Amino acid sequence: MITVMMLGSAVAQETRRLVDSVADDAVTDLRAEQLTGRPDREVQLEGNVEITRGKTSIDAYSVKYNIIDDRVDAVGNVLVQKAGSRFEGNELRLKLDTGVGYMDSLVYKLLQRNAQGRAARIDFESEDQATISSGYYTTCNGPDPDWYLRTGRLTLDEGAGVGYARNAVLVFKGVPVAGAPRISFPLTDERVSGFLAPTIASSTSSGLQVTTPYFWNIAPNRDVTFFPRYIAQRGLMLGADVRYLEREFAGETRFEFINDTKLPGETRYGFSSRHNQVLAPGLTLATDINGASDDNYARDFPLSHVWARPGVNRRLLTQSVAFNYGAADWNGAVRLIDYQVLQDPNALITLPYARLPQVNVNNFHYSDSGLDLTMNSEYTRFAHPTLVQGDRLVFNPRISYSQWQRPGFFIRPSLSLHGTLYNLDQSAPSMTAPARVLPTFSLDSGLVFERDATFFNRQAIQTLEPRAFYTYTPYKEQTAILYPRFDTSEADLNYAQIFRENRFVGHDRVGDSNQLTLALISRFLETTGAERLRLAVAQRINLKDPTVSLGITNQAAAEDILLLMSGRVTDELRLDANLQYDQTNRDVNRMNAGVFWQAGPMKVVNAQYRRDSRNIPGYPYTNYELIDLSGQWPMSQRWYGVGRVNYLLDDRRMGQSLLGVEYLADCWIFRLVGQRIPTAAGVATTHLFMQLEFRGLATLGSSPMRALRGSVPGYQPLQQPQ
């Protein structure tokens, strides 16, 4: 389409016909106050000229349009808009069909990234690619940006979503802070291959550390990040993080190694690998393999990428392979589990038993009559380099009845059988490990009352839920001489465990019981069903004192009173508290209390108190008390403080601690954070993180984000305005 003014309709029609014939799929729209020239060769447009071709538009005071070459020569306040970008200059020469051309003395703006800059010249090399000569790039607004990237040559490849800069210098507040002969950075949120900004960190265990990562975007669902790291006190460490995500499998592997200059001739390494895969309908494979070269690896390399994956314990490294199968009425698993312990001479950890293998088979049968049958069985081969080894077979059938249940009450009787059979190695001749079969009867019952109420002036429903749980298991002698202790410990007494039949975790001990647990719960529910507050009190009453123990058992704890309070009282305030009161010694055995206040964005305050004490006759009194304070709060319009203080009251010493400040500008963020982490008994490592984050370009320094998220519940990263 051609719109012209001050021209006859015959000339306009001929010009439109010739312009449209340049490309079958390209329609050119010309608008101007005046048009002169030859419609079959070249036209001159004057006054408020507008030219549009597809996604490209050109505004200028004067334009000469060569119809044969499909070329535009524009002068005077030239504005080009194409592919989400704006370019303003004095002079333009551009072929519309190929997008090739140039512009002099321009300013530009990349709308998708909110980036802009100036340049002496820009060469349009295609519809999606342009090269800027002698210019700068920034995401700051205004004529005097806080930071900019000064380049000799800058290529913007919007098709690939990448910017390439040569002879680049990063200038911050008028001071050059970094430079490189060649760098790349993303122009969109898509992942692209290239060097990431170097990170600089410092720790008391290894000194200054400089990492220059390289990200390789193999495919949208596969990537590798290489982590070459120079550690001042130890040498060059090489590492990589491999990730993949497919329809049937996914996983991540991190590994690193170093020829430690402090230990000449010794190669040290750490790795962490997790893989999950669907092998067939219902059949899955899961592996979790972690390891390190020596006991001191976690202490000497606290900033290791191996520890970055959630769930990896720094001292007890799991190595497991599991095949799992699930069907409608049964499931099963075969697992191989071993451990590596990174020992601290001042705080030794007992190596857990390896399970080579562990086989579980569970069957379920639920009937409409309410009579439910389950059968849990397990075979395990326990292996250990120094302790008793052997095989254990467990079968645990259960029958329960679930029909006595209505909206206002429930009664659930259950009868189970716990059978255990051992086959110990000859290395334990004094241990007989006879077969053991013990029945357990339990009866769980409760009532539910409801009433209309208000909670902080809001309509709510308050419930009152009394509950009674009775369990009986006869006594059978289970001393350490008769039975091994492969995987069993005494469960902590808490609100969830108090309604379990067996007070032990694991199958090597079945606790005798003749006890009644009484509880009372009250909940405040909003009309939407959201639970605002829960209050509970519970007590286990021994009708007969239990006898089976693991050697150190506080029998009086079975009659301790448990108190619980939790809930999100308001949208900003959350409370969480539980208390275990020892009636015999009139003391609080265990207490956890926490207040979590999220007042708004980047406004959070957390306060927690924990206590755990043991007062068992014949054993030393132990007490562990801790106060944990953390928070994030604005100190001014742009400055934010963040910190955590973890103080051990009984030992009168600091545990983990963190202190830092953050500054939020329009186009950059500054973070300075110090963190102290105990890495061994009596040993702590201090880390210093300093980071400058330039929006839309890169970050310089060391990232404290993992430390901030792990130390301050509710922490929110600062975000620049878009």
Image (cartoon, grey):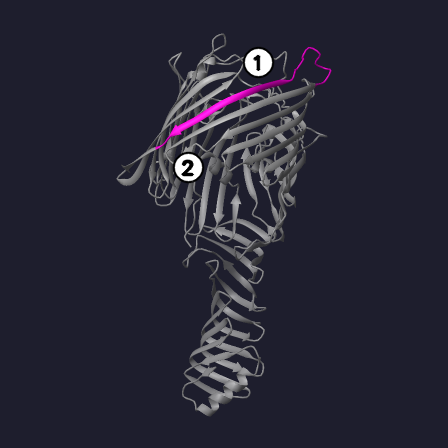
Residue 656, horizontal then vertical, whole percent? 48, 28
The answer to whether residue 183 shows anywhere in this view is yes
Query: In the rendered structure, does residue 78 fall within the stretch colored magenta?
Result: no
Could you tell me which residue is drawn at 55 percent across and 55 percent down?
190
Does label 1 or label 2 sit earlier along the sequence?
Answer: 1
Residue 214, horizontal then vertical, whole percent? 62, 48
Q: Looking at the rendering, which quadrant does residue 628 occupy?
A: top left
Residue 313, horizontal then vertical, whole percent? 57, 31
The kind of residue tagged 2 is Val
Mark nearest the camera among 1 and 2 is 1
Disc number placed over residue 642 in the picture, else none: 2
Say left or right for 255 vs 686. right
Q: Looking at the rendering, which quadrant does residue 289 occupy?
A: top right
The answer to whether residue 506 shows anywhere in this view is no
Residues at badges 1 and 2 in contact (C-beta under 8 Å)? no
Give the magenta part as a residue range. Answer: 424-448
Query: In the rendered structure, does residue 429 fall within the stretch colored magenta?
Result: yes
The residue at which mark 1 appears reads as 476
Q: Judge the density around disc 1: few (<14), some (14-19), many (≥20) Cα neighbours within 10 Å.
A: some
Identify which residue, 625 or 556, lies in the foreground: 556
Which residue extends farthest front?
Answer: 369
The kind of residue tagged 1 is Lys
Q: Secondary structure at mark 2?
A: strand
Q: Judge the density around disc 2: few (<14), some (14-19), many (≥20) Cα neighbours within 10 Å.
A: many
Q: Looking at the rendering, which quadrant does residue 494 occupy?
A: top left
